[in-house]
């Protein structure tokens, strides 16, 4: 049986769609073609995985973004490399562990790191629809570079969200404040565009995971959301994996049903799972086979559990 909190999460999403059960899980034939034949057939590479509006590509995101048509994506969530891996140590689950997440997280120096952020945000700007938005998550190691890159590439910043982690790991050196939040920047493609914001849903829905959000009051820019729960790491985890509660809120806030969401650094595809739960179409890109395989396992398990829930 699913964990009680997971049951509540699924039930919340079912209620949000007014219990239109048949719309939750796309029909078997609704895969790559239903996202948009013209959009994805422009990509020469065959998808690494494609099922039920959930499509994954194994490649450098710049190569895939370059092939997508201009003005084709409704929303982008990106959790780019923090370039934090240095061989030092941090605390994780009460244990001292190396902060090296992988070669993809190694810094190439300040100038080249910033050039990378300039390049991928520029590519995202091209594929976003007019009025489309991008969300970028990061710590102080990278988020300021990302914010400047967005402004340089003509994005218009709408909000910076402080994602507060109630149970953050302690600081081992005892020489700094304990880092207990990440910043999530939300920006629109152009300054004069009109973006989607589901204001009433954010204000009036039940958000039981967030003790800061008060019922029927405006959603503020500080969100209290716990890191990924144990059941979210059943098949393993990505070193910078985001909680499903965070991505569900982002997806619901800035997209509508059947919108196309893209994640250029998809990792274990929490963004994609949030899309599956809320009937959005998802394209994820990553260079790491092991994390794409993890994404597929998570997707299949979620579909299995959700279909089981629908039979009750």
Image (cartoon, rainbow, N blue to C red):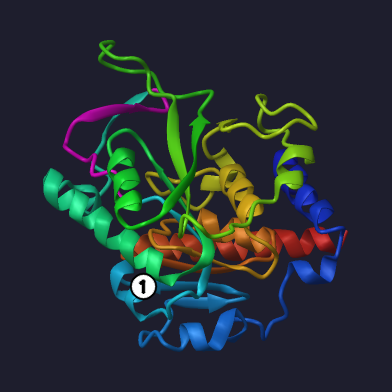
Q: Is residue 93 magenta?
A: yes
Which span of residues is magenta-colored? Answer: 81-94
Residue 236 or 148: which is nearer the viewer? 148
| In-image side of 264 versus 52 (left or right) | left
| In-image side of 114 versus 27 (left or right) | left
Extreme residue toward the top, this view: 174
Identify the residue at horizontal 44%, vertical 51% (top origin): 156
Residue 219 or 234: which is nearer the viewer? 219
Identify the residue at horizontal 32%, vertical 57% (top origin): 153
| Residue 3 found in image quarter | top right
**Element type at marker 1?**
helix
Which residue corresponds to mark 1? 65
Q: Is residue 32 visible?
A: no
Q: Is residue 117 visible?
A: yes
Identify the residue at horizontal 14%, vertical 43% (top origin): 110
Q: Position of residue 270 (x, y in %)?
A: 52, 54
| Residue 304 found in image quarter | bottom right
> In which quadrant of the rendered image does the C terminus lie?
bottom right
| In-image side of 207 versus 274 (left or right) | right
Q: Position of residue 244 (x, y in %)?
A: 58, 47
């Amino acid at each position: 049986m699913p964990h009680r909190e997971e049951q509540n999460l699924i039930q919340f999403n079912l209620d949000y769609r007014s219990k239109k059960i048949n719309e939750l899980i796309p029909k078997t034939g609704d895969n790559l073609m239903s996202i948009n034949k013209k959009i994805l057939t422009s990509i020469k590479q065959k998808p690494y995985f494609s099922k039920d509006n959930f499509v994954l590509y194994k490649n450098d995101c710049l190569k895939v973004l370059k092939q997508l048509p201009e003005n084709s994506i409704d929303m982008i969530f990106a959790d780019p490399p923090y370039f934090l891996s240095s061989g030092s140590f941090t605390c994780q689950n009460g244990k001292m562990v190396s902060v090296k997440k992988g070669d993809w997280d190694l810094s190439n120096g300040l100038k080249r790191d910033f050039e990378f952020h300039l390049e991928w945000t520029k590519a995202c700007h091209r594929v976003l629809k007019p009025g489309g938005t991008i969300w970028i998550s990061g710590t102080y190691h990278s988020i300021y570079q990302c914010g400047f890159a967005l402004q340089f590439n003509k994005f218009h910043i709408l909000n910076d969200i402080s994602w507060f982690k109630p149970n953050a790991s302690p600081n081992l050196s005892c020489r700094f404040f304990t880092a207990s939040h990440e910043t999530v920047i939300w920006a629109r493609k152009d300054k004069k565009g009109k973006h989607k914001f589901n204001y009433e849903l954010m204000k009036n829905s039940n958000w039981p995971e967030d003790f800061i959000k008060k019922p029927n009051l405006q959603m503020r820019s500080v969100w209290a959301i716990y890191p990924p729960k144990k059941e979210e790491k059943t098949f393993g985890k990505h070193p910078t994996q985001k909680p499903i509660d965070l991505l569900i809120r982002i997806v619901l806030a800035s997209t509508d049903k059947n919108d196309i969401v893209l994640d250029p650094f998809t990792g274990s595809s929490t963004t994609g799972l949030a899309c599956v739960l809320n009937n959005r179409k998802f394209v994820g890109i990553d260079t790491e086979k092991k994390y794409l395989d993890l994404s597929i396992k998570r997707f299949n398990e979620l579909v299995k559990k959700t279909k089981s829930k629908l039979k009750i």
